[in-house]
Image (cartoon, coloured by chain):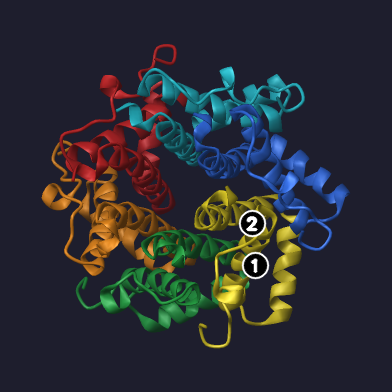
Chain colours: A red, B orange, C green, D cyan, E yellow, F blue
Amino acid sequence: MNGEVELVPGNSLHTASPEEGRALAVRLARLTIKLTQPDAEARTEARKVYANDPAALLAVAQVVATEFATIAAANDYWR
Amino acid sequence: MNGEVELVPGNSLHTASPEEGRALAVRLARLTIKLTQPDAEARTEARKVYANDPAALLAVAQVVATEFATIAAANDYWR
Amino acid sequence: MNGEVELVPGNSLHTASPEEGRALAVRLARLTIKLTQPDAEARTEARKVYANDPAALLAVAQVVATEFATIAAANDYWR
Amino acid sequence: MNGEVELVPGNSLHTASPEEGRALAVRLARLTIKLTQPDAEARTEARKVYANDPAALLAVAQVVATEFATIAAANDYWR
Amino acid sequence: MNGEVELVPGNSLHTASPEEGRALAVRLARLTIKLTQPDAEARTEARKVYANDPAALLAVAQVVATEFATIAAANDYWR
Amino acid sequence: MNGEVELVPGNSLHTASPEEGRALAVRLARLTIKLTQPDAEARTEARKVYANDPAALLAVAQVVATEFATIAAANDYWR
């Protein structure tokens, strides 16, 4: 763990399915943001911005796509 | 699933063809956006922005390219 | 196909040469943009912006580089 | 080392777990920033901006995702 | 070729050395830009912007890094 | 070499350690910038901007992460 913030839930990249792998990708991204902005209220405010700013929505999608690439490779693409 | 939102349609990265793989890449990107902005009307508004803002169009293209890289590898490039 | 828009011309990532692979990378990017902005006239306007905005030119180059990475791998780098 | 700044803590990409790999990804990113902005006070100011600017938070998340991809591959995904 | 613009000089990703591979990465990026902005004078203007805008310089560096990743893999890293 | 600018110091991606690999990643990025902005004084000015602009610091970090991914793979992750 990095101080108080857990960065990889369950400390594993292994997931049972693509759906779970995708959820993990989302959580990894959120935990980086939690590490950078530890204040929960400030993150709630930021999330409102993401949700209503098209550029931010696409930036979120880019981060999740990047995290998912790693998780998918780690799981050998659930083949 | 992540709460109410399905993140990987069919819970598989396997597709029969590049065309279907590309369509899946587009859907993965859209589902990340749906997770971040669950309100359908707000997404419709955002999509209008994407469609008419050159920078946003290119950001969409970047996300889809990144998602497609993973799906193509998962399908061994449909060789 | 994704509704009316074809996303992968020829439904294959295989090309005879790097030059053709590069051209495919450009077409994949353009087809994502066509899917997002189906109106041909609006795309023509957007392309004028790309062509004259240095930041947009570089964003185009980034997307094409990303698409090409996938196509090059799919063709085993034409070795 | 690059002048006075260490760029890879422990001079290794090997970590015992995904959690430690993720922490290393964060440190690699911070050390690049330290190399570019050696003044500690200026970095503290910059970090306040990251923490309160949604676009910057997402840019941090993108960098960490990219670093983590390399570290995960280096550790064969801790399989 | 894509109309009048050659996209991959020599129609090959093979180079004799990393130095030549890097030069090819730069040329691939420039040829994408040439395809998007065929007017030589407009490109000269755009290049002045790149050269004097820190954000654009970094965007150029990002594109070249991405192109080089593909070329380096194509050459098996010149091992 | 690309005109007067060397693009890959030592014309090799091989380094003895991760620390040296990271330093090479930084140098590759800087040499792309040197190629694009050959004037040393202008680069010094640009570097001041990077150092004091949080968005630019993160863009630097993104470029270095991307270059490092290639160098790490070229060195088989120094395993």
Q: Residue at x 71, y 49 (%)?
A: F11
**A73 over B66 or under it: above or below:** above
The front one of B21 and D51 is B21
Q: Amino acid at mark 1?
A: Arg
Query: In which chain is the residue bearing label 2?
Result: E
Distance CA(mark 1)–CA(mark 2): 12 Å
Residue E49: image x %, image y %? 72, 62
Q: Is residue A2 visible?
A: yes
Residue matched to label 2: E60
Q: Neighbour class for label 1 at 10 Å: few (<14), some, many (≥20)? A: some
Query: What count of labels does the image hold?
Result: 2
**A12 over C22 or under it: above or below:** above
Find the residue positioned furthest to the top: A3
Residue matched to label 1: E27
Judged from the image, the secondary structure of the residue bearing numbered disc 2 is helix
**F35 over C47 or under it: above or below:** above
The front one of D23 and B2 is D23
Q: Residue at x 80, y 48 (%)?
A: F43
Say which quarter of the image contains residue B20: bottom left
Q: Is residue A44 visible?
A: no
> In which quadrant is the C terminus of chain B drawn?
bottom left
Residue F60: image x %, image y %? 63, 41
Residue E69: image x %, image y %? 53, 52
Say which quarter of the image contains residue F58: top right
The front one of F3 and B8 is F3
Judged from the image, the secondary structure of the residue bearing numbered disc 1 is helix
Q: Amino acid at mark 2?
A: Val
Q: Do residues under tags 1 and 2 come within 8 Å of each other at their CB atoms?
A: no
